[in-house]
Image (spheres, rainbow, N blue to C red):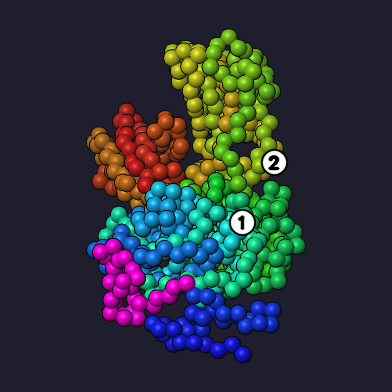
Amino acid sequence: MCTSTHFRGATLRRRLTLLALLVFAGTCVRAQIIFDDDFDRQELGAFWDGDGGWTIRDGQAYNGADSNGALLTTLQSFGATSYVLETEVSNLVGGYQRAYYLLFGQQDEDGTLGYVVRYDPLGGGSLILGEATGNYLYPDVLDKAIINLDPVLAHRIRVAKYENGLIQVYVAGKDGYPTVPTLEAISTTYPTLSRVSWGNATQTAGEEFFVDYLRAAVPAVQKTAPEKPAGDELVEAILTDGDNAYELSRMTEGETFYTDRAYTLTSVPDFLEGARFIKTANDDKLRTDGSLLSVYLSGSAIAYVAYDPRSTVLPTWLSGWTKTDEVIGTTDPGSDYFEVYTKLVPFSIFGPSRYRLTLGAALAAPAVGSNMNYIVALVPYAGSTRYEAEEATLSGVRPATNHTGFSGASFADYINPTADYIEWTIDVPATSPYNLSATYANGSTAPRDLQLYVDGQLQSTATFTSTGGWNNWSYRTLGSSVLLSAGEHRIRLTAAGSSGPNVDYLELTPTSVYTPPAAATSTSLTVVAPPPPPALSAAPAPAVTVSVYPNPTVDAVTFEWVGEMEASDLRIVDLQGREVYRRSVGTRSAHGVSDRLRLEVSDWPVGTYFYQLRSGGQVMAGRFVKGG
């Protein structure tokens, strides 16, 4: 029978852990302690270098808010080449440029060389295992995980390093340490335990930080092989605000789609066959949280939410999505199909991943009617797809090479003032709104128009202004975005009265900024109009005044005008002059009564945008800033 021995300075609740008693192959194995401290006294003592900022408070090593940046470091350097570190810390408060650091294998006391476990709470939380090769604040990353640790709770961390260089990091949850390491890497750069430190650093207001205990022992057994499964190339993490499991899977007919029900998918759109999707918990269907699910991605993707068709009012978080004609069949007794909504996963400025998708609960306000949880599918994309003009069907248009600066083998030259066209047959990979744009040159002084047809239907007429020379190429969006289903489509540009410009290529780019045709309604754009005004006198209409707010903005921007607005287009371009949004504004308002147009921009790239709005002979222009 294995028995326990009391170690000086250890509290009763930690004796068994301190001894690390294991039964291995039928034999009691007692781990060899390298050092142990639970700070159950009045002062740090001679074992530690507190760097002038650490004391003892209530049986814990304490770093005050006014001394962030100081390291708590062992004065002794340990020669063990295989070891297990265990520690418990609390008050892991987030903030801009605030992170927490466990250093080991330190070759010197300032942490410039050695291994680092860094926790950064901002933007969802990330845990990094790295090598400090000059500055422990910014280590070279060996492995990374997205993990959100509640700052109110204390958290236990275990780091094990074995003789062959295998390093495993575990973060304990409510049920103890997981069986699979949170972080894992193989490195032999720093072979010995050397010095060990805890610390935190911040560029904002300091916060109190506590270390309840820190100890090291020689592992009872040596591991030689990695144990952490390979991660998904696109989905880095799925975090929920609830306790129910959400899992990553692949979408296919016959697959279950909830983690807590046996219901299966009976039909899947071809473009989603085999796509990544998130199985949710149907027990969460009645939740009303404004934020429930966060998905972290390593690259750009189009997201699809499959939602209950019985809903009569959508939640606010879904209002920026585009409803498609796609459906996904199910065996759920409540509804035998989902309706499918889509948008791009927004680029994330702050946080552990480049892209983050945050969704609320199915019944988040003001949702009405839904009685099943949604599921989420993800399709990666690599940006724009280019289609050369000379490779399309040309009618009247001729391939030419008599000007410079074009891509591909040639460009397309319109000959006749009308009827000439270029028609591309394109294969759309996934159902989504798309921006269509063309690269062109117009060396004449007069603008030239081209009509855009999609699958034989006229969409818009685009005006191609002068580029100042036939060797000067410019970029032009072809009107509002179009909703294209996955599969083959015909895109045609037809001369409309004055021949056309030289066209180099067509570009197809997914977008979430979608304005449906006038006969349709949009869940991503809301126009709020006052009641019909009373009859006006014949007095001249005053000038229209426009205000834009909030500016800067993060989620949405509102255009509000006062005066008698004539039919016009609201046009928005980015810093490169590329048109990112256009909408016809034809609402009139009485003198002194304002109209408002709210545009959801949460998924737009961060940056400065310029807008222009015309009313008769009046031109109103300005800028707004989209923040992160």
Label 2: how many residues lie within 10 Å, few (<14), some (14-19) or many (20+)? few
* Quadrant of the frame with the N terminus: bottom right
The x and y percentages for residue 459 are: 57, 34
Q: Nearer the viewer, residue 565 or 407?
A: 407
Question: Mark 1 sits on what residue?
Answer: 231
Above/below status of 212 relative to 192:
below
The x and y percentages for residue 494 are: 60, 23
Secondary structure, mark 1, is: loop
Q: What stretch is highlighted in magenta?
A: 34-63
Question: Residue 335 sits in which quadrant?
Answer: bottom right
Lower sequence index among marks 1 and 2? 1
- Is there a contact, CB below 8 Å, between mark 1 and mark 2? no
The x and y percentages for residue 501 are: 54, 18
Can you name the residue that lies furthest to the top here? 402
In the image, 52: left or right of 121? Answer: left
Question: Residue 561 sits in which quadrant?
Answer: top left
Question: What's the amino acid at mark 1?
Answer: Gly
Q: Is residue 521 visible?
A: no
Residue at (24% x, 37% y) in the render: 542
Question: Mark 2 sits on what residue?
Answer: 487
The x and y percentages for residue 541 are: 26, 36
* Spatial separation of the CA atoms under disc 1 and disc 2: 30 Å
